[in-house]
Amino acid sequence: QVQLVESGGGLVQAGGSLRLSCAASGRTFSYYAMGWFRQAPGKEREFVARISASGSSTYYADSVKGRFTISRDNSKNTVALQMNSLKPEDTAVYYCAADRSSIVTVKITNYDYWGQGTQVTVSS
């Protein structure tokens, strides 16, 4: 069992930066690949980024590539999403999720555990 709690969301102007953090409970955090997803009002939840269990591999949606960076610290059971050059279209609730499988996937249904989400609002 893994419990996830996101933090770091807020209101920022376009072009600004935010750093989201996700804290995980449990001693098996290092066994899980971790992902960030987002859901804007009236839209489906979509993949943002993923990092392997060891942290050696990362994968990004095209819409955030070059602007967002995912990282993790297995000694602290945390995963972060550094978001730079934010755009109004990045406005959404951001969720972190844990995936026990090592197969890279963007499918929501493949992730085993989810946090409650944190709101990110980017003003123009």
Image (cartoon, rainbow, N blue to C red):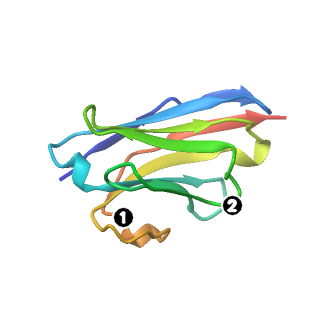
Q: Please say if the residues under marks 1 and 2 sit with CB atoms less than 8 Å apart.
A: no
Q: Position of residue 59 (x, y in %)?
A: 53, 59
Q: Position of residue 110 (x, y in %)?
A: 37, 71
Determine the residue positioned at 32% across, 43% down.
4
Spot the residue most to the right: 124
Spot the residue most to the front: 56
* Disc 1 secondary structure class: loop
Does residue 54 appear left or right of residue 10 in this picture?
Answer: left
Residue 85: quarter of image: top right
Q: Is residue 93 above or below residue 76?
A: below
Q: Give the amino acid type for the residue marked by disc 2 in the picture.
A: Asp
**Mark on residue 30?**
none
Determine the residue positioned at 60% across, 65% down.
44
Q: Give the amino acid type for the residue marked by disc 1 in the picture.
A: Tyr
Q: How many marks?
A: 2
Pick the front one: 24 or 92: 24
Q: Which residue is mark 2?
A: 62
Q: Is residue 93 above or below residue 13?
A: below
Pick the front one: 54 or 14: 54
Q: Is residue 93 above or below residue 6?
A: below
* Disc 2 secondary structure class: loop
If the image is split into quadrants, where does the C terminus sit?
top right
Determine the residue positioned at 17% across, 49% down.
28
Tag 2 or tag 1, which sits nearer the N-term? 2
Q: Which residue is mark 1?
A: 111
